[in-house]
Amino acid sequence: MKKTLTELADYVGGKVAGDGSIEILGVMTIEDAAEGYITFVSNQKYENMINETKASAVIAAPHIKNSGKPLLVVDNPYLAYAKIVDLMMNVKPAHPKTIAPGATIDKNVSLGNGVTIYPNVFVGANCSIGDNTVLYPGVYIGEDCKIGSDTEIFPNAVVYKACSIGNRVTIHSNAVIGSPSFGYAPDGKTYYKIPHVGTTVIEDDVDIEPNTTISRAALGETRIKKGAKIGCLVAVAHSVEVGENTLIVAQSGIAGSVKIGNNVTIAGQTGVSGHLKIGDNTVIGGRSGVANDLPPNGVFLGAPAMPIKKMRKCYAAIARLPEMRDTVKELTKKVATLENKMK
């Protein structure tokens, strides 16, 4: 696919500075770009490379001036880059819209128009699957599940019984939705497994990356609200509520009954203790440990997580601890010497 720079600018709602008639073949990184390709700058540290790159054009923010390259000027270069890649380079497969031989469809299953079910898929009894949904090889759907339209479930993902999956949801390989959570009641000698008889609800436009588990509620529901994006190797326990358009990055763990607000960002390898509330628009830095409720609109870091400005001071103090220890030792000796002189 070829597009002129002007056509791309129109597509992403930007403006051209320079020759808009040049043809673009695709997108490449600023370091590796070749003639005929467009690149992008969304980080200030790469701005000095604009005139060094071999790319024919650059997607850039409005403050970039006096470039020797034609520019596609847009307020959000990273978003424009994503849209252009999706337009020009993200080739989507053509699905057969049939049920393949080797798939197992149990009784009373309702299938919408244009559904594709690949070999070795199992769909349990009393399920419904919406229009144009795709189930890749090896997918397991338990009985009494409801799956919306235009949803993709990739190979070897598992949806346990009686779960609800919305429209335009993406569930990647080896993700597990609706499994029983980790819950045991001690009986004095061993542990009695607590039955988890609730459900898991995944609302519209949610993305769930590979090897993530979202457990069902013991009672009631675990709910991932619309537009949320959950990274790989994330564990979401029973009865958790994840708000709209919230991001949970890879290797994070959310304990049971946590309520997470809308537009929250939880960076990688963060742990959240059970029964906490995290307010809307909160940002939690990577490798944090959340042990208390967090108010809305804050930025937090560390274990235990605290306001980022305070935690940065703590980190600075930790870096100086060896010197501070030596200073304390020296002062202790001096105090002891003075005390001996005063005796």
Image (cartoon, helix red, strand yellow):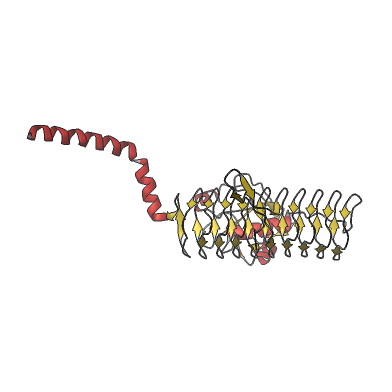
Residue 1 visible, this orientation: no
Q: Position of residue 12 (x, y in %)?
A: 65, 64
Question: 271 or 246: which is nearer to us?
Answer: 271
Q: Position of residue 89 (x, y in %)?
A: 73, 53
Question: Residue placed at 80% from the left, 52% from the top?
Answer: 136
Q: Is residue 286 left or right of residue 242?
A: left
Question: 321 or 23: which is nearer to us?
Answer: 321
Q: Is residue 174 above or below residue 341?
A: below
Q: Is residue 34 above or below residue 274?
A: above
Q: Position of residue 46 (x, y in %)?
A: 53, 50
Q: Is residue 76 left or right of residue 131?
A: left
Image quarter where the C terminus lies is top left
Q: Is residue 71 left or right of residue 112?
A: left
Q: Position of residue 234 (x, y in %)?
A: 62, 50
Count how many numbered circles sit on residues in the image: 0
Q: Quadrant of residue 92?
A: bottom right
Q: Quadrant of residue 164?
A: bottom right
Image quarter where the N terminus lies is bottom right
Residue 78 visible, this orientation: yes
Residue extending furthest right? 101
Q: Quadrant of residue 82?
A: bottom right
Residue extending furthest front? 188
Question: 272 or 189: which is nearer to us?
Answer: 189
